[in-house]
């Protein structure tokens, strides 16, 4: 997939001793397990190396005519179209001969391109400048194809390291007349244009992704040979023909359906042929599936939803009787016994009324009491105003009590008539005794005296005559 899909951010291809699920920074990465083995004869060593371009998106073989030995991960400058290209060494040594034999390429072919030199700083700078243009070129090329109304999908653009050639990879269902599109690309991008059509599976390999198994796509990590896949492979493996589950991200049937197909075909050789139907007295039995792990064949009878598992020997026996024109009375299905221990169902007891909830009730009561105490202890900001009002009310009630005491039976001022000129004025306050005066205290006629404070309490019954009485 590349560095972006690495969880640690330091994949092995960068020589940072990191971890990557693909084993390196490149797609279709190959581990050279013959790398540390000593070579007896250096003259017989393979002079061809495998070079990957654009993080393993494309791989080609180049002849090493230099006297330098390259290691995996080294950048080299190779021959290109009217210029040079830059790639990364993917494989060296004897494993390259195996790859050449697998691809059907001659090691000593004169048409094979050569490695020019190890990449220098100038080559790397030119390479990075060219690669930075690819994203903008891809977006512009898709817009141009849409303007020309071409039924094609551009999936990737690859520029040569020197920027003189551009390869446009596209997918299409039918043939496309893109001559006008090539002229547009050449005039706008100033490069030599090469249009290369790829399949839908190759497009998924270039884009990459995560499959339903939770791993990276096989086509983007190690699979490079795409074989045709059909629904027969799913039938041999007793899989339900569900297009949604059997299709990959490319929209085609998953390539992994072919991985275990040979194993299933070898296991199915022990099963009898032409055993799709069996003749019985109750009707014709139809084969619904084959269990290669238990060597069983499952049949069903008409007007019956039950499935009958039969052994291979029993099916062969019934088939021989049917050839003689004999219909069996019963299929003699075997009884399947599960290897798992049977779980004992717990017995339920009626405990209604036996479980006491007093503990829960006590906890609830304790919680309510605690909450009530907390509310009582919480200060109220209005209490100080209520205290002031209560103090005023207490003072007023005390005044009333003192006035009532002064108006008791021992106060002759209220019981005897007053002969003075102020006999009609209400007695709003008690008369203080004369503090040694020779005559009665003058009384103001301006009105009742205001009560500015609490009255003095009565000091007891007074035997002295009132000041208002005549001497």
Image (cartoon, rainbow, N blue to C red):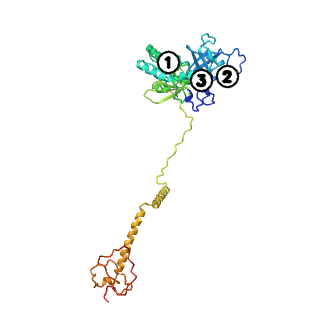
Determine which of the numbered discs, if any, sits on residue 29 in the image: 3
Which one is nearer the viewer's eye here, 282 or 233? 233
Q: Quadrant of residue 453?
A: bottom left
Give percent across and percent down for residue 396.
Answer: 37, 72
Helix, strand or loop under label 2:
loop
Q: Which residue is mark 1?
A: 168
Q: Position of residue 9 (x, y in %)?
A: 58, 31
Direction from residue 402 to residue 240 in the image, left or right: right
Mark 2 or mark 1, which has the lower sequence index? 2
In percent of the image, x 40 and y 66: which residue is there?
A: 388
- Percent coordinates x, y for residue 401 in the rendering: 37, 76
Q: Looking at the picture, does residue 307 appear above or below residue 352?
A: above
Residue 169: percent from left, percent from top? 50, 18
Work out whether mark 3 precedes mark 2 in sequence or the reverse, and give the earlier one.
Answer: 3
SS at mark 1 in the image: strand
Residue 35: image tag: 2
């Amino acid at each position: 997939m590349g560095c972006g899909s690495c969880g640690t951010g330091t994949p092995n291809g960068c020589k940072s001793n990191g971890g990557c699920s693909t084993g390196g920074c490149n797609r279709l990465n190959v581990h050279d397990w013959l790398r540390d083995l000593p070579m007896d004869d250096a003259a017989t060593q393979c002079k061809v190396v495998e070079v990957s371009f654009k993080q393993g998106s494309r791989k080609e073989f180049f002849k090493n005519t230099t006297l330098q030995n390259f290691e995996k991960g080294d950048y080299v400058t190779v021959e290109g179209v009217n210029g040079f290209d830059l790639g990364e060494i993917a494989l060296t040594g004897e494993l390259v001969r195996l790859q050449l034999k697998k691809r059907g390429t001659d090691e000593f072919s004169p048409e094979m391109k050569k490695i020019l030199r190890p990449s220098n700083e100038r080559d790397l700078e030119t390479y990075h400048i060219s690669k930075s243009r690819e994203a903008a070129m891809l977006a512009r090329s898709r817009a141009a194809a849409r303007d020309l109304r071409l039924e094609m999908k551009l999936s990737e653009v690859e520029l040569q390291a020197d920027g003189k050639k551009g390869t446009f990879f596209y997918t299409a269902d039918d043939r496309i007349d893109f001559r006008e599109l090539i002229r547009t690309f050449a005039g706008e991008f100033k490069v030599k244009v090469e249009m290369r059509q790829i399949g839908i599976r190759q497009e998924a390999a270039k884009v990459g992704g995560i499959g339903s198994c939770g791993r990276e796509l096989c086509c983007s990590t190690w699979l490079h040979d795409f074989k045709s896949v059909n629904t027969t492979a799913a039938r041999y493996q007793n899989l339900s023909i569900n297009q949604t589950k059997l299709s990959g991200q490319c929209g085609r049937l998953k390539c992994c359906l072919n991985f275990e197909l040979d194993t299933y075909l070898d296991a199915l050789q022990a099963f009898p042929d032409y055993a799709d139907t069996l003749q019985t007295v109750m009707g014709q039995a139809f084969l619904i599936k084959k269990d290669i792990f238990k060597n069983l064949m499952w049949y069903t009878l008409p007007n019956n939803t039950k499935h009958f598992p039969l052994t291979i020997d029993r099916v062969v026996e019934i088939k021989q009787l049917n050839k003689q024109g004999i219909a069996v009375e019963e299929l003699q299905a075997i009884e399947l016994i599960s290897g798992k221990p049977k779980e004992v169902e717990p017995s339920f007891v009626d405990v209604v009324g036996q479980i006491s909830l007093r503990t829960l009730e006590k906890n609830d009561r304790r919680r309510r009491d605690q909450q009530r105490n907390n509310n009582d202890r919480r200060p109220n900001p209005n209490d100080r105003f209520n205290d002031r009002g209560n103090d005023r009310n207490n003072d007023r009630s005390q005044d009333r009590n003192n006035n009532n005491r002064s108006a008791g039976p021992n106060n002759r001022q209220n019981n005897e008539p007053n002969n003075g000129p102020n006999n009609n004025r209400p007695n709003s306050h008690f008369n203080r005794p004369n503090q040694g005066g020779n005559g009665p205290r003058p009384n103001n006629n301006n009105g009742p005296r205001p009560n500015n404070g609490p009255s003095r309490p009565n000091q007891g019954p007074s035997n002295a005559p009132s000041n208002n009485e005549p001497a």
